[in-house]
Image (cartoon, rainbow, N blue to C red):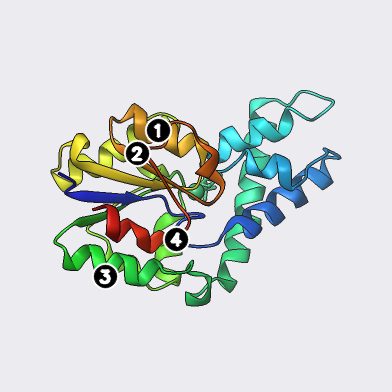
Amino acid sequence: MIKAVIFDLDGVIVSTDELHYQSWKKIADDENIYFDKIINHKLRGVSRMDSLNIILGYASKTYSEDEKINLATNKNDIYVELLKQLDQKDILPNVVETLKGLKSKGIFIAIGSSSKNAKPILRRIGLIDMFDVIADGNDIKHSKPAPDVFLVAAERLGVNPNSCMVVEDAMAGIKAAKNAKMIAVAVSEAKNSEIADYRLDNLKDLLLII
Ligand code: BG6
Ligand code: MG
């Protein structure tokens, strides 16, 4: 029986994809590294440093650890500046009614995000108080596809992993959910995943499967 739903944040609750893309694009252009929206898809659900390493895979030179830290810091500075434009209009369709519907069924709701900016983002879109638990990139060493962020969320909720459902838009996130032995629900870009337990066109269909 499902007792909790753990939501990924970026691409499931809120549309930050374009802001991540613009920030990485600036870094890549300054470094003369080819970067486009197809490469950007590979960064979904992946931590900041792992994302940088994917981008640097297209570079013609190698980067030292210090250079990598500088680039990741610069990307985050640009991203945090862009986040100032984020507000309730960026909440994705059907999110609020789905969260309210789950709450009215007595289901716990949590965030399981790779982002270290998850809390400021939730504050900006006015949803921070909706969630029973928030687990994010600050709580873990190993990012998705490792199960860690979802296991932290389940532990804080006091719910067994096998009673948790995860909603994800990233292949890495679906793998993380399965690695955590949770039910994986794919939306958006993750819908091609063969290992997801459910694939939804509309988030509010979650209320039909719980
Ligand atoms: C994930 C995004 O939610 O967070 C990734 O899908 C991003 O694209 C990752 O790289 C880390 O985010 P942040 O905010 O800590 O740089
Ligand atoms: Mg995501």
Left or right: where 20 falls relative to 22: left
How many angstroms separate mark 3 from mark 1 (CA)? 25 Å
Q: Which mark is residue 100?
A: 3
How many angstroms separate mark 1 from mark 2 (CA)? 8 Å
Q: Which mark is residue 45?
A: none
Q: Mark 4 — residue?
A: 202
Counting residues from the N terminus, which is met first, the one under dot 4 or under dot 1? 1
Disc 1: CA contacts within 10 A as few (<14), some (14-19) or many (>=20): many
Left or right: where 79 falls relative to 171: right
Q: Mark 2 — residue?
A: 149
| Ligand 2 lies under 8 Å from the Cβ of mark 4 | no
Q: Which mark is residue 176?
A: 1
Q: Nearer the viewer, residue 130 or 99?
A: 99
Residue type beneath disc 1: Ala
Left or right: where 73 falls relative to 47: right
Percent across and percent down for residue 151 are 27, 36
Quadrant of the rendered image containing residue 52 = top right
Residue type beneath disc 2: Val
Counting residues from the N terminus, which is met first, the one under dot 2 or under dot 4? 2
Counting residues from the N terminus, which is met first, the one under dot 2 or under dot 3? 3
State which mark lies toward you, 2 or 4.
Answer: 4
Residue type beneath disc 3: Lys
Q: Is residue 35 above or below residue 130?
A: above
Q: Nearer the viewer, residue 172 or 125?
A: 172
State which mark lies toward you, 2 or 3.
Answer: 3
How many angstroms separate mark 2 from mark 4 (CA)? 24 Å
Counting residues from the N terminus, which is met first, the one under dot 3 or under dot 1? 3
User: In the rendered image, which quarter contains the N terminus?
Assistant: top left
State which mark lies toward you, 4 or 1.
Answer: 4
Percent across and percent down for residue 170 are 51, 42
Whether tag 1 and tag 2 are in contact, CB under 8 A, the answer is yes
